Amino acid sequence: METLYDLMALTLFIATAGIFFYRYRSENPPLAPYMLISLTCAVSNWLGNNGGGVGAVLLLIAGSFYLLHIAGAPYAEETE
């Protein structure tokens, strides 16, 4: 890890993976929101390392708020 963007993106990714695995133990959460946050981490890291610092920070902030939204809203179990 060389830059601050690497650290911030990795921290958000670890938090996303942690919440996904915690939810996966007791529920069956959809994968798409977590993949979207992971993609946001990758794009913001790339932007930050290539001179797009403001865009990278904005993406990381948006990803963080989306993760907080996901963490606060429980998913309903599918009934058959």
Image: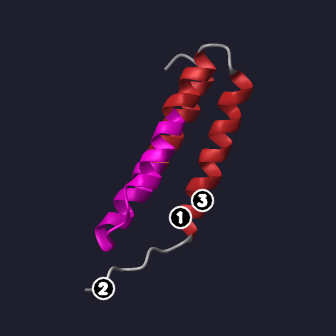
- Given residues 78 and 13, the one toward you in this image is 78
Task: Kindly report which numbered mark, 2 or 3, lies closer to the viewer in this rendering.
Answer: 2
Please state the horizontal and vertical placement of residue 1, each as a whole percent of the image: 49, 20
Label 1 is placed on what type of residue? Ala
Q: Where 56 sits versus 72, above or below?
A: above
Element at badge 2? loop
Q: Residue at x 70, y 22 (%)?
A: 53
Q: Residue furthest right?
A: 54
What's the distance in space between the residues labelled 2 and 1, CA to CA?
Answer: 22 Å
Element at badge 1? helix
**What crowding class fits label 2: few (fewer than 14 Cα within 10 Å), some (14-19), or many (20 or more)?**
few
Which residue is under mark 2? 79
Q: Residue at x 64, y 37 (%)?
A: 59
Q: Is residue 65 left or right of residue 14?
A: right
Is label 3 in contact with label 1 (beta carbons under 8 Å)? yes
Question: Mark 2 or 3 closer to N-term?
Answer: 3
Please state the horizontal and vertical placement of residue 30, each as a whole percent of the image: 38, 62
Label 3 is placed on what type of residue? Leu
Q: Is residue 19 magenta?
A: yes
Magenta stretch, overall SS: helix
Which residue is under mark 1? 71
Chain part drawn in magenta: 16-41
Q: Residue at x 65, y 53 (%)?
A: 65
Q: Residue furthest top?
A: 50
Q: Residue furthest front?
A: 80
Q: Is residue 21 magenta?
A: yes
Place residue 72 in its image quadrant. bottom right
Question: Mark 2 or 1 closer to N-term?
Answer: 1
